[in-house]
Image (tube, helix red, strand yellow):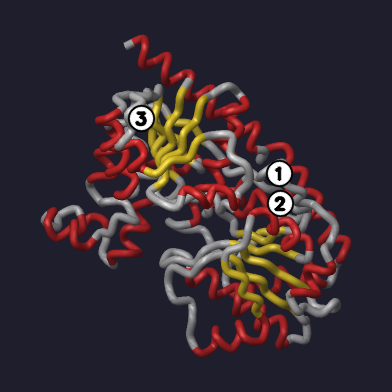
Amino acid sequence: MKILFVTYRHLNNNSGVHIFNLANQLTRLGVECVVCVPDHKETVALLGTPLFEVVVADDLRQDETKRSFDLIHVWTPREVTRKIALELLALYPCPYIVHLEDNEEFIIESYAGFPIGFLKHIPNILLDLLIPETISHPLRYKEFLEKASGVTVIMETLKDFCPPNIPSRVIWAGYQEDLEWDMSQNAEYKRRLGIARDEFVVAYTGNVHAANQEEVASLYEAIDILNHRGVPVKLIRTGEDHVRLSNKKLDEIKKKYGVELGLISRADMPSLLSITDALVQPGKPGRFNDYRFPSKLPEYLASGKPVVLPKSNIGHYLKNNEECLLLDRGDALDIAEKLSLLFSNESLRNAIGSGGRQFAEKHLRWSHIADSLHSFYISLLNDVKSK
C-alpha cells in the first residue's frame, strides 16, 4: 500500500506532529508513505527521524519516476492543501480522503468577520479576495469533501460536516511513545529558565490564532490573579502568535510572570513538561472547542502532570477529579480557582496526574491510532476495488 499525505504547512506544527507519527507507525506496518508539504521539508528533522519520504509539491510536479499511489490523504480542506491535492490527483489518479481537525466554518467566520451563510452568497471573485489560502473556502471545501472516498475526523462531532453516505473514521491525537513524557523534574532546565525553586510552573505549549486568543489571554489573567493572591506562579509559553496577543495589561503580565520560549524542538518538550506543576488547556464549550482535539493534550496527559481543561472535546471522555480537572466556566477566575486547588494539595496533583497518564497509555498511543487508520485505508481501498 502506498499513501501520499498532503498537508498545508511544513511538519513542525501540531498537524505535522500527527502526520509524522502516523506515517512512521504506518511504515512499521508495511505501508509506503510519502508526505508532501508546501515548503521547508527539512523541518521534519525537528520532530525526530522519519521512516518515510518528505517532499515539497514541486518535487512531485517534476517527478519523472512515474510513481503511483493507492490513496491520497489530504490533511484538512484548507485552500492551499485542496489546490495542491487537486494538482497531484491529476498527476497520480487515485482515491482521496480528507482529514478534519477543526470546525472549518467557525474558523472562516472568525477570519472573515461574517456569518458563513452570508459568505456563501458573495460573488466568487470577491470571495477569492476575502478568503486566504491558509483557511478553507466557504464553498469549495464542501465540494472537495463530497468528492472524497472517505473522511477522517479528530473528534466524533466533526462528522456533522461529513457528507452523508461517505465512510468516516475517528482518529484521535496521540503522544510520541519514544519520548519520555513522564520524566523526573529537570531541575537544571528550570534554573536555566530563571524560575525560582519555590515558584509553581504552568505551561501552555500551543499557537495563538484568532479563534483562541481570548482563551489564552484568560490563562495569562489567571496567572496574574494567583500571583496577586500570594501564590507564586510562572507561565511558560511555547508556539507562535499568529495574531497579536498583546495589550498593556497582558504585556505587564508577560513581563512579570511569563517565560516566552517560542518554537522549541520536540526533544526538549518532555524536559519542559517535567518542571510544571499543572498544565492548562483554557477554553469553554462552543463552536470552536466542541469540534477539536487540542494536540498538546495527549502529551500533557502522558506527562503525569494534572491537566485542567474545558468540559468539551476530550474532556467528555476523562473522569473529573480522577484523570483531569474540568473547568466550570472557563474564564480566568475559574482557571485560577482550579490551579489554586491543585497547588494547595500535592496528593491531589499526583493522583490526577497519574490518572491522566493511565488514560493516555490506554487510549492515546500513536501505535494504536495508526492501527485503526490502517484498517480504514484497507476498508476504503477494498470498497473502491469492488465498485
Q: Position of residue 36 (x, y in %)?
A: 42, 40
Three-letter code, disc 2: Leu
Which residue is at a point 74% across and 40% down the rendered structure image? 361
Disc 3 on helix, strand or loop?
strand
Task: Tell me where residue 226 sits by quadrant.
Answer: bottom right
Residue 96 marker: 3
Residue closest to the far right: 347
Q: Is residue 71 left or right of residue 309?
A: left
Residue at image mark 1: 360
Above or below: residue 101 compared with residue 72:
below
Mark 1 closeness class: few <14, some 14–19, many ≥20 residues within 10 Å: many
Residue 159 in sight from this viewpoint: no
Circles 2 and 1 in contact, beta carbons < 8 Å: yes
Residue closest to the far top: 386
- The alpha-carbon separation of the residues under discs 3 and 1 comes to 30 Å
Q: Quadrant of the C terminus?
A: top left
Q: Could you tell which of marks 3 and 1 lies nearer the N-terminus? A: 3
Q: Position of residue 113 (x, y in %)?
A: 29, 67
Mark 2 closeness class: few <14, some 14–19, many ≥20 residues within 10 Å: many
Q: Is residue 24 left or right of residue 181?
A: left
Q: Position of residue 156 (x, y in %)?
A: 49, 40
Three-letter code, disc 3: Tyr
Q: Is residue 85 left or right of residue 196?
A: left
Disc 1 on helix, strand or loop?
helix
Which residue is at a point 54% across and 75% down the rendered structure image? 217
Task: Tell me where residue 88 sits by quadrant.
Answer: top left
Circles 3 and 2 in contact, beta carbons < 8 Å: no
Residue 339 in sight from this viewpoint: yes
Residue at image mark 2: 301
- The alpha-carbon separation of the residues under discs 2 and 1 comes to 6 Å
Q: Could you tell which of marks 2 and 1 lies nearer the N-terminus? A: 2
